Amino acid sequence: MENRSLANHVARLMELLPRDGTTVDLMPLFGRLSLDTASEFIFSKSLGALISPDAHKDFMDTFFYA
């Protein structure tokens, strides 16, 4: 069985990129991509950071507190 979760996350990232040639800051998007791929690997469930920019806020607040 082939795991396509990385491809799914990258596809979501590509959907967030503007198609009109405008400049975009990729750093926050790559950070959200990293959170989604790492959380799916560790917890078997993505945080959904690429779906919603605030989806991972509670997790990150708790992580930094710990």
Image (tube, grey):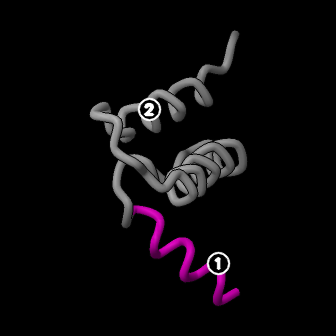
Q: Position of residue 28 (x, y in %)?
A: 52, 60
Q: Is residue 58 left or right of residue 21?
A: right
Q: Residue at x 38, y 60 (%)?
A: 53
Task: Look at the numbered disc 2 and give the secondary structure of its residue.
Answer: helix
Q: Nearer the viewer, mark 2 or mark 1?
A: 2
Q: Residue at x 46, y 75 (%)?
A: 58
Q: Quadrant of residue 12?
A: top left
The local crowd at label 1, few if under 14, some if 14 to 19, many if 20 or more residues have their Cα within 10 Å, is few
Q: Quick one: 10 or 58, which is closer to the camera?
A: 10
Q: Residue at x 59, y 57 (%)?
A: 31
Q: Is residue 51 above or below residue 3?
A: below
Q: Which residue is mark 2?
A: 14
Nearest to N terminus: mark 2 or mark 1: 2
The mark total stands at 2
Q: Quadrant of residue 63?
A: bottom right
Q: Residue at x 46, y 27 (%)?
A: 11
Q: Position of residue 18 (x, y in %)?
A: 33, 39
Q: Which mark is residue 1?
A: none
Q: Is residue 55 left or right of residue 4?
A: left
> Bounds of the magenta span?
55-66
Task: Look at the numbered disc 1 and give the secondary structure of its residue.
Answer: helix
Q: Is residue 1 above or below residue 47?
A: above
Instruction: Work out which quarter of the rendered image holds the C terminus and state it.
Output: bottom right
Q: CA distance from mark 2 to mark 1?
A: 27 Å
Q: Position of residue 56 (x, y in %)?
A: 47, 65
Amino acid at the residue labelled 2: Met
The local crowd at label 2, few if under 14, some if 14 to 19, many if 20 or more residues have their Cα within 10 Å, is few
Amino acid at the residue labelled 1: Phe
Instruction: Work out which quarter of the rendered image holds the N terminus and state it.
Output: top right
Q: Quick one: 54 or 17, which is closer to the camera?
A: 17
Q: Which residue is mark 1?
A: 63
Q: Is residue 17 left or right of residue 33?
A: left
